[in-house]
Amino acid sequence: MRWLLATLTLIVFGAIPLGILTMGAVMVAPALAEQVRQDPCSAYDTATTLATTTSSTAGFALPKWGTPRHQSLTSPAQTIPATVKALYLAAAARYQVPWQLLAGIGMAETRHGRNNHTSSAGAQGLMQFMPGTFAAYGVDGNDDGRRDIGNDADSIFSAANYLVHSGVRTGTAGVIRALWSYNRSVSYRNDVLYYAWSYAGHGGVIVESGDPTDCLPVDETLPGFDGTCPPSHSAAEHGLRAPARRGLRCINAAFPAITYMGGRRSASSSTCRFSDHCTGLAVDFMIPNWSSRAGNAYGWRVARWVQANAKALRVKYIIFDARKWVPTVSGAWRPYRHPYGNTNPTLAHRDHVHVSFYDH
């Protein structure tokens, strides 16, 4: 957990939180609106991303992760040391929160203590508390009579206490608000939820510590295409028009390593004036391990495949890796700059392949 002076501009990736929110349980929209204003590509349709999974510990469900993600794209969930998992379970039982949520935060912050160093901002401990925050919300997790910011038990129990004070037990909106309080970054929140779902058995794989994370296919040949496009069972299909829905299915069938896709956005999104997402005619294909050399190559493999089958898929244009291909303009890939600038991988389309489709 890291803090940010109120006068600083919110940074989407690796953002530092302002601290506990003072909004009521239903006042999530203003925070999201501000995030979207500063990073339009972080917008997503809550109707499709707030799917839930029942926690085995708490009496409420966790919302599913959305987009963008950052850390979890290149670093999958790691196994939890037995002593640390016991603390997650104990803290979850005392504060009635999902242990998977605590594990998701522990993974995002320090990989369950494996990278337990004081941050450049001064955050400390397994769950990365600033001393001032710990002074306000820290608890004695191991009942030794003192609160120690560097003690794993105290850190984990204090995180659970902080989440409860931030409204985590008030339903899915409360989870979103609490994670926003913990770290004011949409990508961080999505990373935490992705990890939480992984530990619940419904997300990504869990790897042994030290295992290679670069498991993408290295084949440079393009898959064939026979027109077979089975349903993807992705929530991203919801709200898409027929050409985009078929395109999503076809591309997902050709590249099954892509497990997350973003489809239609709310019509209220500030990007609607220049985005096909709001009309249900665009899909973002999030590239696993995109920041690695293999991930980038895999993304280009996807983009080239879509380009090769553009006519059959009714493709309007493709954007990837700060490049854009518009078949009606030129056969070449040209430099691309987002209307809000290429200030992060999502705006520059380095972490996903964007495909827009014609509606006929």
Image (spheres, helix red, strand yellow):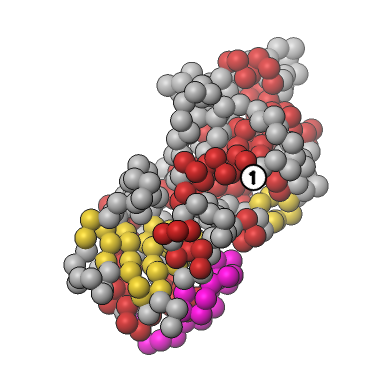
The correct choice, above or below, for 303 with respect to 294 in the image is below
Q: Secondary structure at mark 1?
A: helix
Task: Answer left or right for 216 relative to 85.
Answer: left
Q: Quadrant of the C terminus?
A: bottom left
Region rendered in magenta: 221-244
Q: Quadrant of the N terminus?
A: top right
Task: Answer left or right for 113 relative to 200.
Answer: left
- Residue 26 in percent (x, y) is at 74, 43
Q: Which residue is mark 1?
A: 29
Residue at 52 percent of width and 33 percent of height: 109
Q: Quadrant of residue 228?
A: bottom left
Hey, which residue is sitting farthest front in the picture? 273
- Residue 222 in percent (x, y) is at 28, 74
Q: Quadrant of residue 18?
A: top right
- Residue 307 in percent (x, y) is at 29, 73
- Residue 224 in percent (x, y) is at 32, 81
Task: Answer left or right for 181 relative to 324.
Answer: right
Is 118 inside the magenta-drawn segment? Answer: no
The residue type indicated by label 1 comes to: Ala
Residue at 58 percent of width and 70 percent of height: 239
Q: What kind of secondary structure does the magenta stretch mostly adopt?
A: loop
